[in-house]
Image (cartoon, grey):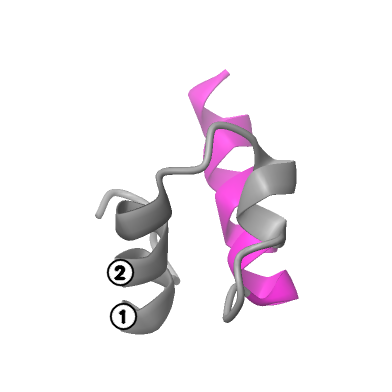
Amino acid sequence: DKVPGLTTEAREKLKKFRPLTVGQASRIDGITHATITALLAYLGKLE
């Protein structure tokens, strides 16, 4: 819920599957390149 720019579908799928890596997240059906970009941007801000 803290990652801005994610669709409701992406949030639901990430909550359901709880991927441990960005690679795992990218292989979830329905997760788009835009979702991965938003995740990477968010993770970059945490560092």
Name which residue lies at 63% across and 33% down. 44
Q: Are marks 2 and 1 in contact (CB under 8 Å)?
A: yes
Residue picked out by circle 1 = 8
Q: Is residue 8 visible?
A: yes
Q: Is residue 7 visible?
A: no
- What crowding class fits label 2: few (fewer than 14 Cα within 10 Å), some (14-19), or many (20 or more)? few
Q: How many marks?
A: 2
Name which residue lies at 60% across and 73% down. 31
Q: Is residue 4 above or below residue 25?
A: below
Is 35 on the left or on the right of 7, as rendered? right
- What crowding class fits label 1: few (fewer than 14 Cα within 10 Å), some (14-19), or many (20 or more)? few
Is 31 on the left or on the right of 9, as rendered? right
Q: Nearest the camera: 23 or 35?
A: 23
Indicate the position of residue 47 as horizontal and vertical percent values.
58, 18
Amino acid at dot 2 = Glu
Indicate the position of residue 43 as horizontal and vertical percent values.
56, 35
Residue picked out by circle 2 = 12
Name which residue lies at 61% across and 65% down. 28
- Magenta span: chief secondary structure: helix
Chain part drawn in magenta: 32-47
Distance between mark 2 and mark 1 Cα atoms: 6 Å
Indicate the position of residue 29 as horizontal and vertical percent values.
61, 76
Indicate the position of residue 36 as horizontal and vertical percent values.
66, 60
